Amino acid sequence: MTTTERPETKCPTCKKRVIWNSESRWRPFCSERCRLIDLGEWLDESHRINAGPADHSLDLYDREPND
């Protein structure tokens, strides 16, 4: 990357190009609106992190204490 090139990314919400630097207040989003839309999608559980079944063998509260 040369000194004249600026790193860019796409806004996760609207796909608009966003310059990635300290002056980009809402990065990686292009605006507060897009940031709040994304937050709302997480709160509505439209976005979620897929995980496998829980490993209950690691549940410390079900174990007997060591004597």
Image (cartoon, grey):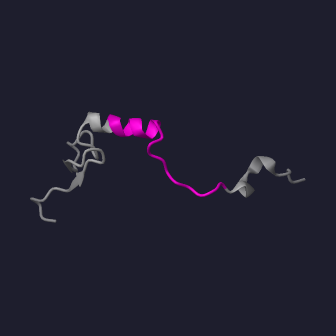
Image location of residue 18, percent across then percent down: 20, 48
Q: Residue lying farthest front? A: 46
Question: In this rendering, would 8 be left or right of 3?
Answer: right
Picture quadrant where residue 33 is located: top left
Q: Residue at x 41, y 39 (%)?
A: 41
Q: Position of residue 39 (x, y in %)?
A: 39, 37
Outermost residue toward the right? 67
**Residue for point 75% across, 50% down:** 60
User: Based on the displayed image, in which of its 4 quarters is residue 9 positioned?
Assistant: bottom left
Task: Check if residue 10 falls in the magenta segment.
Answer: no
The x and y percentages for residue 46 are 44, 42
Q: Nearer the viewer, residue 27 or 34?
A: 34
Residue 54 appears left or right of 7: right
Q: What residue lies at 27% left-to-right and 43% top-to-bottom?
A: 29
- Say left or right for 54 vs 17: right
Q: Quadrant of the N terminus?
A: bottom left
In the rendered image, residue 44 lying in the magenta stretch gets the answer yes
Task: Give the vertical position of 66 relative to 25 (above or below).
Answer: below
Front residue of this view, candidates 28 and 50: 50
- Report the span colored magenta: 36-54
Q: How many marks overall?
A: 0
The picture places residue 53, in percent across and down from the top left corner, at 64, 56
Q: Determine the residue located farthest toward the bottom in the rendered image.
A: 1
Residue 32, located in which quarter of the rendered image?
top left
Which residue is outermost to the left? 4
